[in-house]
Amino acid sequence: MAKDSKRMKRFLFLRATFEESTDLDSSKTLEEYIAQSYSNLKTAKERIVSYAGQTWVGTFFKKKDDCLFFQFSVATFGENATTLPTDALDMESVELDATAPPNGREFSEGDVICCVAQNNIFTCQSLVRDSKIEFYLRALFEKAELSGRSQTLHVDKPANFDKIRMIKAVGVKSIRIKASLSDAQFVRLDDIHGKGPFKKILRGLVCEDKALVEAARDSEAQMKIEFNVPKKSITSGAQEWIETEALEAMGEGDSYQIITNDGKVITSDDITISKNERLERFGKSVFVDEAMRKLEIFKNEFEMIHGTGKN
């Protein structure tokens, strides 16, 4: 059977925020910071940054009147790729091979293509989690020698407004949140951004015993937390508290489950603002031009409903 030439991609809507600042650029948007970075760093070679043991390269940039597009790729320089010897599959056991990349090339481990308008971000990801976008951009801004305010960038995953209304109407019974401590967002334990319940608890643990958290992170440990309000304890005060924590978890984009009082289970995938599109395959990725065109359509559709979100 012929391989499908297209792959299903899930576009996400994200939003950038910055901490309040007295810097001269305190009104700058993410779009302006990115444009300035790519102006300061003219070539892809200048836009190579290292983070969490990987090399991230700003491979593409294009500016339009009302938005910009950029792509970054992730690689581990000097690393071979594991391959399956399909000509030996009639044997009882088969050993995998390691294949070096061609001269002048490295194997890409994934990439992200983004459309940015003001502080709104529309993404198409291939093998890279959306949490990596914030950390690539911070490293890029640092290399481009932008202001201190640019380093306070935080990328949120806003929730679908209809789901928020439903949760407030029905109420929350419990929240379950999990994350891998080896994720890039936890590389700098003294600089964990966000106000979601997971981040708040982890910051407290770092203050209490940083060595323990470092050991857990280096062991690629999974951390899980659960808040549960027993039925007999449900009061207006308890509901207000757990609903606030649920909304903050949704804003952070953590991997979570929210169980409502009527028994519905809502996951992070259910509640994000997203759109599914079929795009032509380009290796493990997709073609930049096609992704740009469809991301811009996603942006325009979003702005028709919600406005530009300039502030």
Image (spheres, rainbow, N blue to C red):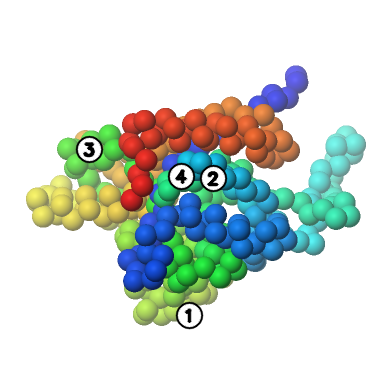
> Badge 3: how crowded within 10 Å, few (<14), some, or many (20+)?
few
- Whole-percent x, y for residue 218 in the image: 56, 70
Residue named by callout 4: 117
- Distance of mark 4 from mark 3, alpha carbons? 26 Å
Left or right: residue 182 compared with residue 1: left
Left or right: residue 41 compared with residue 205: right
Mark in the foreground, 1 or 3: 3
- Of residues 45 and 282, the one drawn nearer to the viewer in this rendering: 45
Residue named by callout 1: 211
> Badge 1: how crowded within 10 Å, few (<14), some, or many (20+)?
few
Dot 3 amino acid type: Arg
Q: Which element is circle 3 on?
A: helix
In primary-sequence order, the first of circles 4 and 3 is 4
Residue named by callout 3: 165
In primary-sequence order, the first of circles 2 and 1 is 2
Dot 1 amino acid type: Ala
Dot 2 amino acid type: Leu
- Whole-percent x, y for residue 287 in the image: 67, 36
- Distance of mark 1 from mark 3, alpha carbons? 41 Å
Q: Residue at x 23, y 36 (%)?
A: 166
Residue 311, numbered label = none
- Whole-percent x, y for residue 269 in the image: 42, 40
In primary-sequence order, the first of circles 1 and 4 is 4
Marks 4 and 2 close (CB-CB < 8 Å) = no
Left or right: residue 161 compared with residue 279: left
- Distance of mark 2 from mark 1, alpha carbons? 41 Å
Q: Residue at x 44, y 32 (%)?
A: 300
- Whole-percent x, y for residue 289 in the image: 65, 35
